[in-house]
Image (cartoon, rainbow, N blue to C red):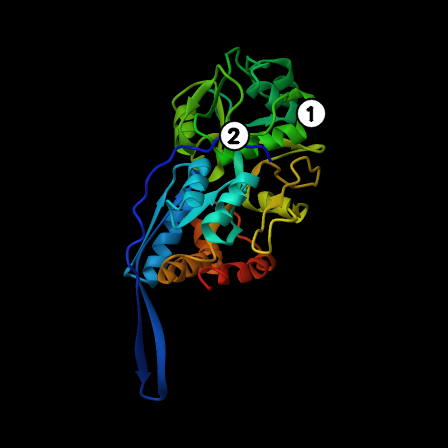
Amino acid sequence: MNRTSLGRFVALPTAGALVLGVAACGAANEGSAEESELAGTISGAGASSQQAAQQAWTAGFQDQYPDVTVNYDPIGSGGGREQFVSGGSDFGGTDAYLDDDELAAAQDRCADFIEVPLYISPVAIVFNLDGVDELNLSPRTIAGIFNQDITEWDDPAIAEDNPDAELPSLPISPVNRSDESGTTENFLEYLTAAAGDAWPHEPSGDWPVGGGEAAQGTSGVVEAVRNGDGTIGYADASQAGDLSTVAVGVGDEFVNYSPEAASTVLDVSERVEGRGENSFAYELARDTTEEGTYPIVLVSYGLACTEYDDDQVGELVREYFTFMASEEGQQQAAENAGSAPISDELREQITPAIEAIGAT
Protein backbone atom coordinates (compact mmCIF):
# COMPACT_ATOMS: atom_id res chain seq x y z
CA MET A 1 0.00 0.00 0.00
CA ASN A 2 1.47 3.33 -1.02
CA ARG A 3 1.21 6.14 1.42
CA THR A 4 2.43 9.71 1.38
CA SER A 5 3.47 11.83 4.35
CA LEU A 6 1.64 11.32 7.58
CA GLY A 7 -1.03 13.59 8.96
CA ARG A 8 -0.63 16.47 11.37
CA PHE A 9 0.87 15.97 14.79
CA VAL A 10 -1.34 16.79 17.73
CA ALA A 11 0.13 16.46 21.18
CA LEU A 12 -1.86 14.33 23.56
CA PRO A 13 -1.61 14.30 27.31
CA THR A 14 0.58 11.51 28.55
CA ALA A 15 -1.13 8.73 30.37
CA GLY A 16 -1.64 9.51 34.01
CA ALA A 17 -0.32 7.28 36.72
CA LEU A 18 -2.42 4.16 37.01
CA VAL A 19 -3.44 2.57 40.23
CA LEU A 20 -4.02 -1.16 40.22
CA GLY A 21 -5.55 -2.21 43.49
CA VAL A 22 -6.47 -5.63 44.68
CA ALA A 23 -9.47 -5.89 46.98
CA ALA A 24 -10.62 -8.93 48.86
CA CYS A 25 -14.23 -9.85 48.23
CA GLY A 26 -16.24 -12.34 50.19
CA ALA A 27 -19.72 -13.73 50.56
CA ALA A 28 -21.48 -15.64 53.29
CA ASN A 29 -21.30 -18.95 51.48
CA GLU A 30 -18.25 -18.33 49.30
CA GLY A 31 -14.54 -18.07 49.91
CA SER A 32 -12.71 -14.81 49.45
CA ALA A 33 -11.70 -13.74 45.94
CA GLU A 34 -9.44 -11.11 44.58
CA GLU A 35 -10.77 -8.54 42.15
CA SER A 36 -8.63 -6.08 40.24
CA GLU A 37 -9.81 -2.50 40.12
CA LEU A 38 -8.34 -0.31 37.40
CA ALA A 39 -7.94 3.44 37.65
CA GLY A 40 -6.12 6.03 35.62
CA THR A 41 -6.02 7.60 32.17
CA ILE A 42 -4.93 6.44 28.74
CA SER A 43 -5.05 8.44 25.54
CA GLY A 44 -5.46 7.33 21.93
CA ALA A 45 -5.73 9.10 18.60
CA GLY A 46 -6.55 8.24 15.04
CA ALA A 47 -9.28 7.41 12.57
CA SER A 48 -12.30 9.68 12.70
CA SER A 49 -14.33 6.76 11.34
CA GLN A 50 -13.97 5.13 14.75
CA GLN A 51 -15.31 8.16 16.61
CA ALA A 52 -18.84 6.91 17.28
CA ALA A 53 -17.58 3.44 18.15
CA GLN A 54 -14.91 4.85 20.46
CA GLN A 55 -17.57 6.88 22.25
CA ALA A 56 -19.57 3.69 22.81
CA TRP A 57 -16.50 1.70 23.86
CA THR A 58 -15.23 4.29 26.33
CA ALA A 59 -18.69 4.63 27.87
CA GLY A 60 -19.07 0.86 28.24
CA PHE A 61 -15.54 0.39 29.57
CA GLN A 62 -15.91 3.23 32.04
CA ASP A 63 -19.18 1.73 33.26
CA GLN A 64 -17.14 -1.29 34.32
CA TYR A 65 -14.23 0.78 35.62
CA PRO A 66 -15.57 4.14 36.87
CA ASP A 67 -12.10 5.34 37.87
CA VAL A 68 -10.72 4.94 34.34
CA THR A 69 -10.60 7.73 31.76
CA VAL A 70 -10.05 6.85 28.10
CA ASN A 71 -9.41 9.74 25.73
CA TYR A 72 -9.64 9.37 21.96
CA ASP A 73 -8.78 12.21 19.56
CA PRO A 74 -10.31 11.58 16.07
CA ILE A 75 -7.56 13.41 14.18
CA GLY A 76 -7.58 11.01 11.23
CA SER A 77 -5.68 7.83 10.42
CA GLY A 78 -2.46 9.52 9.31
CA GLY A 79 -2.23 11.57 12.48
CA GLY A 80 -3.13 8.53 14.55
CA ARG A 81 -0.32 6.45 13.07
CA GLU A 82 2.16 9.28 13.58
CA GLN A 83 1.07 9.78 17.16
CA PHE A 84 1.39 6.11 17.92
CA VAL A 85 4.78 5.39 16.32
CA SER A 86 6.28 8.59 17.81
CA GLY A 87 5.07 7.77 21.33
CA GLY A 88 2.57 10.62 21.48
CA SER A 89 -0.35 8.31 22.33
CA ASP A 90 -0.85 5.11 24.26
CA PHE A 91 -2.80 3.45 21.45
CA GLY A 92 -3.85 4.28 17.90
CA GLY A 93 -6.69 3.80 15.47
CA THR A 94 -6.19 3.61 11.72
CA ASP A 95 -8.19 2.68 8.63
CA ALA A 96 -5.03 1.63 6.79
CA TYR A 97 -2.43 -0.73 8.19
CA LEU A 98 1.11 0.47 8.83
CA ASP A 99 3.41 0.76 5.83
CA ASP A 100 7.03 -0.44 5.89
CA ASP A 101 8.48 2.79 7.30
CA GLU A 102 5.77 2.95 9.97
CA LEU A 103 6.37 -0.70 10.83
CA ALA A 104 10.02 0.06 11.54
CA ALA A 105 9.11 3.14 13.61
CA ALA A 106 6.54 1.18 15.60
CA GLN A 107 9.12 -1.52 16.35
CA ASP A 108 11.60 1.15 17.46
CA ARG A 109 9.04 2.48 19.90
CA CYS A 110 7.52 -0.78 21.10
CA ALA A 111 10.02 -3.57 20.39
CA ASP A 112 6.89 -5.33 19.15
CA PHE A 113 3.40 -4.05 18.42
CA ILE A 114 -0.07 -5.38 17.71
CA GLU A 115 -2.34 -4.43 14.81
CA VAL A 116 -5.83 -5.92 15.03
CA PRO A 117 -9.12 -5.20 13.21
CA LEU A 118 -11.66 -3.88 15.68
CA TYR A 119 -14.07 -1.91 13.49
CA ILE A 120 -15.56 -2.97 10.17
CA SER A 121 -17.81 -0.55 8.37
CA PRO A 122 -19.07 0.31 4.92
CA VAL A 123 -17.84 3.50 3.30
CA ALA A 124 -21.03 5.08 2.03
CA ILE A 125 -21.17 7.23 -1.08
CA VAL A 126 -23.47 9.98 0.16
CA PHE A 127 -25.27 12.46 -2.04
CA ASN A 128 -27.72 15.33 -1.82
CA LEU A 129 -29.73 15.80 -5.03
CA ASP A 130 -33.11 17.48 -4.91
CA GLY A 131 -35.81 15.10 -6.14
CA VAL A 132 -33.59 12.01 -6.18
CA ASP A 133 -33.51 9.75 -3.13
CA GLU A 134 -32.13 6.54 -4.66
CA LEU A 135 -29.19 6.15 -7.00
CA ASN A 136 -27.42 3.20 -8.61
CA LEU A 137 -23.86 3.70 -9.82
CA SER A 138 -21.44 1.28 -11.47
CA PRO A 139 -17.76 1.40 -10.44
CA ARG A 140 -16.71 3.13 -13.67
CA THR A 141 -19.42 5.77 -13.25
CA ILE A 142 -18.36 6.42 -9.66
CA ALA A 143 -14.77 6.83 -10.86
CA GLY A 144 -15.85 9.22 -13.61
CA ILE A 145 -17.75 11.38 -11.14
CA PHE A 146 -14.92 11.67 -8.62
CA ASN A 147 -12.30 12.14 -11.34
CA GLN A 148 -14.52 14.96 -12.65
CA ASP A 149 -14.90 13.38 -16.08
CA ILE A 150 -18.67 13.14 -15.47
CA THR A 151 -19.78 16.61 -14.46
CA GLU A 152 -23.59 16.75 -14.88
CA TRP A 153 -26.22 14.71 -13.07
CA ASP A 154 -28.09 13.89 -16.28
CA ASP A 155 -24.97 12.44 -17.90
CA PRO A 156 -25.77 9.36 -20.04
CA ALA A 157 -23.61 7.11 -17.85
CA ILE A 158 -25.66 7.97 -14.74
CA ALA A 159 -28.90 7.70 -16.70
CA GLU A 160 -27.93 4.23 -17.91
CA ASP A 161 -27.56 3.05 -14.31
CA ASN A 162 -30.83 4.75 -13.31
CA PRO A 163 -33.35 4.39 -16.18
CA ASP A 164 -36.36 5.25 -13.98
CA ALA A 165 -34.88 8.30 -12.24
CA GLU A 166 -35.64 11.90 -13.20
CA LEU A 167 -32.12 13.28 -13.20
CA PRO A 168 -31.79 17.07 -13.18
CA SER A 169 -29.51 19.05 -15.45
CA LEU A 170 -27.33 20.19 -12.58
CA PRO A 171 -23.55 20.32 -12.06
CA ILE A 172 -22.09 17.58 -9.88
CA SER A 173 -20.19 18.91 -6.85
CA PRO A 174 -17.84 16.19 -5.55
CA VAL A 175 -16.62 16.49 -1.95
CA ASN A 176 -13.43 14.84 -0.72
CA ARG A 177 -11.36 14.75 2.46
CA SER A 178 -8.82 17.56 2.91
CA ASP A 179 -6.77 15.61 5.48
CA GLU A 180 -4.85 12.40 4.97
CA SER A 181 -7.39 9.72 5.67
CA GLY A 182 -7.74 5.97 5.82
CA THR A 183 -11.29 6.41 4.55
CA THR A 184 -9.87 8.08 1.44
CA GLU A 185 -7.30 5.32 0.99
CA ASN A 186 -9.95 2.60 1.27
CA PHE A 187 -12.20 4.40 -1.22
CA LEU A 188 -9.33 4.86 -3.68
CA GLU A 189 -8.29 1.23 -3.33
CA TYR A 190 -11.83 0.28 -4.32
CA LEU A 191 -11.78 2.59 -7.37
CA THR A 192 -8.36 1.28 -8.44
CA ALA A 193 -9.46 -2.35 -8.19
CA ALA A 194 -13.01 -2.10 -9.52
CA ALA A 195 -13.05 0.78 -12.03
CA GLY A 196 -10.14 -0.16 -14.27
CA ASP A 197 -8.73 2.60 -16.45
CA ALA A 198 -11.60 4.92 -15.48
CA TRP A 199 -9.58 5.65 -12.33
CA PRO A 200 -5.97 6.57 -13.28
CA HIS A 201 -4.65 7.41 -9.79
CA GLU A 202 -2.71 5.33 -7.29
CA PRO A 203 -4.30 4.62 -3.89
CA SER A 204 -3.22 7.05 -1.20
CA GLY A 205 -4.51 8.59 1.98
CA ASP A 206 -4.36 11.97 0.22
CA TRP A 207 -7.03 12.90 -2.33
CA PRO A 208 -5.40 13.06 -5.81
CA VAL A 209 -7.89 15.16 -7.83
CA GLY A 210 -7.97 18.94 -7.57
CA GLY A 211 -10.92 21.23 -8.14
CA GLY A 212 -13.56 19.68 -5.90
CA GLU A 213 -14.66 20.76 -2.45
CA ALA A 214 -12.41 19.55 0.37
CA ALA A 215 -13.53 19.08 3.97
CA GLN A 216 -11.79 18.07 7.19
CA GLY A 217 -12.67 14.69 8.64
CA THR A 218 -15.66 12.44 8.14
CA SER A 219 -18.00 14.91 9.80
CA GLY A 220 -16.74 17.70 7.53
CA VAL A 221 -17.53 15.73 4.36
CA VAL A 222 -21.00 14.84 5.64
CA GLU A 223 -21.73 18.45 6.53
CA ALA A 224 -20.53 19.74 3.14
CA VAL A 225 -22.69 17.23 1.26
CA ARG A 226 -25.71 17.98 3.45
CA ASN A 227 -25.38 21.74 2.97
CA GLY A 228 -25.18 21.58 -0.83
CA ASP A 229 -27.36 20.55 -3.75
CA GLY A 230 -25.91 18.26 -6.35
CA THR A 231 -23.18 17.26 -3.92
CA ILE A 232 -21.66 13.79 -3.58
CA GLY A 233 -18.95 12.49 -1.27
CA TYR A 234 -17.72 9.46 0.62
CA ALA A 235 -17.87 8.91 4.36
CA ASP A 236 -17.96 6.21 6.97
CA ALA A 237 -21.52 4.93 6.87
CA SER A 238 -21.93 5.31 10.62
CA GLN A 239 -21.99 9.08 10.13
CA ALA A 240 -24.10 9.22 6.95
CA GLY A 241 -27.18 10.10 8.98
CA ASP A 242 -30.22 10.97 6.87
CA LEU A 243 -28.26 11.56 3.65
CA SER A 244 -29.13 9.48 0.59
CA THR A 245 -26.60 6.79 -0.32
CA VAL A 246 -25.55 5.07 -3.53
CA ALA A 247 -26.20 1.40 -4.34
CA VAL A 248 -22.93 0.18 -5.86
CA GLY A 249 -22.63 -2.07 -8.88
CA VAL A 250 -21.32 -5.53 -7.93
CA GLY A 251 -21.40 -8.13 -10.68
CA ASP A 252 -24.87 -8.01 -12.21
CA GLU A 253 -26.59 -6.27 -9.29
CA PHE A 254 -26.52 -3.04 -7.31
CA VAL A 255 -25.87 -3.47 -3.58
CA ASN A 256 -26.79 -1.04 -0.83
CA TYR A 257 -24.45 -0.81 2.12
CA SER A 258 -25.18 -2.65 5.33
CA PRO A 259 -23.01 -4.03 8.13
CA GLU A 260 -23.73 -7.57 6.94
CA ALA A 261 -22.86 -6.86 3.29
CA ALA A 262 -19.66 -5.10 4.40
CA SER A 263 -18.47 -7.88 6.70
CA THR A 264 -18.80 -10.39 3.84
CA VAL A 265 -15.72 -8.85 2.21
CA LEU A 266 -13.43 -10.24 4.92
CA ASP A 267 -14.69 -13.73 4.12
CA VAL A 268 -13.18 -13.47 0.63
CA SER A 269 -10.03 -11.55 1.66
CA GLU A 270 -6.59 -12.73 2.77
CA ARG A 271 -4.34 -11.75 5.65
CA VAL A 272 -1.12 -9.95 4.69
CA GLU A 273 1.87 -12.20 5.31
CA GLY A 274 5.28 -11.40 6.72
CA ARG A 275 4.25 -8.73 9.24
CA GLY A 276 4.66 -10.64 12.49
CA GLU A 277 2.38 -12.88 14.48
CA ASN A 278 0.56 -9.96 16.15
CA SER A 279 -0.30 -8.12 12.93
CA PHE A 280 -3.71 -8.92 11.46
CA ALA A 281 -3.72 -6.75 8.36
CA TYR A 282 -5.90 -7.78 5.41
CA GLU A 283 -5.72 -7.27 1.67
CA LEU A 284 -9.39 -6.68 0.91
CA ALA A 285 -11.03 -8.12 -2.22
CA ARG A 286 -12.29 -4.78 -3.57
CA ASP A 287 -13.18 -6.13 -7.00
CA THR A 288 -15.33 -8.99 -5.77
CA THR A 289 -18.44 -9.95 -7.71
CA GLU A 290 -19.81 -12.05 -4.85
CA GLU A 291 -23.57 -11.66 -4.60
CA GLY A 292 -24.76 -9.52 -1.70
CA THR A 293 -21.30 -8.11 -0.97
CA TYR A 294 -20.72 -4.38 -0.50
CA PRO A 295 -17.11 -3.84 -1.62
CA ILE A 296 -16.41 -0.29 -0.38
CA VAL A 297 -15.47 -0.99 3.19
CA LEU A 298 -12.95 0.08 5.71
CA VAL A 299 -11.42 -2.22 8.22
CA SER A 300 -10.13 -0.06 11.03
CA TYR A 301 -7.31 -1.34 13.20
CA GLY A 302 -6.24 -0.83 16.78
CA LEU A 303 -2.52 -0.26 17.40
CA ALA A 304 -0.81 -0.98 20.70
CA CYS A 305 2.58 -1.96 22.09
CA THR A 306 3.50 -5.25 23.66
CA GLU A 307 5.81 -3.28 25.97
CA TYR A 308 5.22 0.06 27.71
CA ASP A 309 7.58 2.04 29.92
CA ASP A 310 4.85 1.95 32.55
CA ASP A 311 3.60 -1.60 33.07
CA GLN A 312 0.32 -0.31 34.46
CA VAL A 313 -0.34 1.61 31.23
CA GLY A 314 0.08 -1.68 29.39
CA GLU A 315 -2.37 -3.32 31.78
CA LEU A 316 -5.02 -0.72 31.12
CA VAL A 317 -4.50 -0.69 27.34
CA ARG A 318 -4.78 -4.48 27.31
CA GLU A 319 -8.05 -4.42 29.25
CA TYR A 320 -9.47 -1.72 26.97
CA PHE A 321 -8.57 -3.67 23.81
CA THR A 322 -10.05 -6.80 25.36
CA PHE A 323 -13.29 -4.93 25.88
CA MET A 324 -13.34 -3.44 22.36
CA ALA A 325 -12.89 -6.90 20.81
CA SER A 326 -15.38 -8.62 23.11
CA GLU A 327 -18.86 -9.61 21.98
CA GLU A 328 -20.28 -6.94 24.28
CA GLY A 329 -17.98 -4.25 22.95
CA GLN A 330 -18.63 -5.15 19.32
CA GLN A 331 -22.39 -5.10 19.92
CA GLN A 332 -22.18 -1.66 21.52
CA ALA A 333 -20.25 -0.40 18.49
CA ALA A 334 -22.82 -1.94 16.13
CA GLU A 335 -25.71 -0.30 17.98
CA ASN A 336 -24.10 3.12 18.22
CA ALA A 337 -21.96 3.29 15.08
CA GLY A 338 -23.61 0.94 12.61
CA SER A 339 -20.49 -1.19 12.30
CA ALA A 340 -20.33 -4.90 11.55
CA PRO A 341 -19.32 -6.97 14.60
CA ILE A 342 -16.21 -9.06 14.07
CA SER A 343 -16.85 -12.78 13.87
CA ASP A 344 -16.24 -15.20 16.74
CA GLU A 345 -13.58 -16.84 14.57
CA LEU A 346 -11.71 -13.56 14.08
CA ARG A 347 -12.03 -12.74 17.79
CA GLU A 348 -10.43 -16.08 18.63
CA GLN A 349 -7.58 -15.40 16.20
CA ILE A 350 -6.73 -11.92 17.55
CA THR A 351 -7.13 -12.72 21.26
CA PRO A 352 -3.51 -13.94 21.72
CA ALA A 353 -2.24 -10.68 20.19
CA ILE A 354 -4.35 -8.61 22.57
CA GLU A 355 -3.19 -10.70 25.51
CA ALA A 356 0.39 -9.85 24.53
CA ILE A 357 -0.18 -6.12 25.25
CA GLY A 358 1.90 -5.12 28.25
CA ALA A 359 2.66 -8.75 29.02
CA THR A 360 6.44 -8.44 29.01
Front tag of 1 and 2: 2
What amino acid is labelled 1 in the image? Gly
Q: Which mark is residue 196?
A: 1
Disc count in the image? 2
Taking the spot 41% from the left edge, 43% from the top edge, the residue there is 86
Instruction: Looking at this view, name the residue that lies furthest to the top.
Output: 169
Q: Earlier in the sequence, mark 1 or mark 2?
A: 2
Q: Which residue is mark 2?
A: 4
Percent x, y of residue 190: 61, 32
Image vertical order of residue 357 relative to residue 106, above or below: below
Dot 2 surroundings within 10 Å: few (below 14), some, or many (20 or more)?
A: few
Percent x, y of residue 80: 43, 41
Image vertical order of residue 134 relative to residue 230, above or below: below
Taking the spot 62% from the left edge, 37% from the top edge, the residue there is 295
- Helix or strand or loop: what does disc 2 sit on? loop
Q: Quadrant of residue 39?
A: bottom left
Percent x, y of residue 145: 57, 19
- Helix or strand or loop: what does disc 1 sit on? helix
